[in-house]
Image: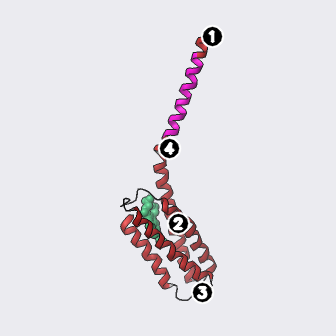
Amino acid sequence: MYLKLVFTMLFILSVGRTVLADDYNHQHKKPVTMQMKTQHRIMTVINNEWNAAKKAIDSGDLRSAEKSLQTILDKSQYMEKFVGYKNADKHAEFISEYHLFVTHVKNLRDKISGQDSSAPESLKKEIQDSCIRCHAKFK
Ligand code: HEC
């Protein structure tokens, strides 16, 4: 009777350990790769939406340009949580680049949502420069 109880307890303990070990692996190993994958995905979406926005502006389709720019703004919130990039120890600098980028994208979005398609070239260039500057330092 006691022996059965002891075996049952041991069984429960060993299952518990396996579950805990899995949990540990999830928390300490996999998230790094998941995180990197997420970062790649976020930047890929931003890249695609930026290309779409530029095209839409050039063809005068301000509605879809605005939509793409809004998606960039929504997705770029995640950039604040980026880790493991080049020069990651200069996190404060990364964050100010990120803030600049968001400001430039907002400026263009606001101009476009006012149906103002005049001279967006300089605003476009500011965003493009922002991509290049941040990548030069951090990608
Ligand atoms: C505030 C910094 C910052 C800004 C601004 C920025 N990026 Fe990035 N970008 C990064 C970092 C860091 C990586 C590398 C991410 C990684 O490898 O996890 C990256 C990676 C990429 C990649 C490669 C994606 C992949 O497969 O890893 C592309 C494409 C890209 N960015 C496009 C853009 C475009 C287009 C813009 C501007 C519209 C932009 N980025 C603005 C920091 C930035």
Q: Residue at the spot x=44%, y=72% of the render?
A: 131
Q: Is mark 1 within 8 Å of ligand 1?
A: no
- Residue contact at pointers 1 and 4, CB within 8 angstroms: no
Q: Give the number of the mark in front: 1 or 3.
A: 1
Q: Which mark is residue 27?
A: 4
Picture colour scheme: secondary structure
Q: Which mark is residue 76?
A: 2
Q: Is mark 2 within 8 Å of ligand 1?
A: yes
Vertical position of residue 43 compared to residue 62: above or below: above
Q: Amino acid at mark 2?
A: Ser
State the separation of the CA atoms marked 1 and 4: 39 Å
Q: In the image, is residue 22 part of the stretch drawn in magenta?
A: yes
Q: Residue at the spot x=36%, y=59% of the render?
A: 89
- Residue contact at pointers 1 and 3, CB within 8 angstroms: no
State the separation of the CA atoms marked 4 and 2: 24 Å
Q: Is mark 4 within 8 Å of ligand 1?
A: no
Vertical position of residue 82 compared to residue 106: above or below: above
SS class, disc 2: helix
Asked which quadrant contains residue 16, the reply is top right
SS class, disc 1: loop
Q: Quadrant of the N terminus?
A: top right
Q: Amino acid at mark 1?
A: Met
Vertical position of residue 129 compared to residue 41: above or below: below
Q: Which residues are magenta?
A: 6-24
Q: Residue at the spot x=50%, y=64% of the render?
A: 44
In the displayed image of the protein, which residue is found farthest to the front?
A: 92
Q: Which residue is mark 3?
A: 116
Asked which quadrant contains residue 5, the reply is top right
In the displayed image of the protein, which residue is found farthest to the bottom?
A: 118
SS class, disc 4: helix
- Residue contact at pointers 4 and 2, CB within 8 angstroms: no
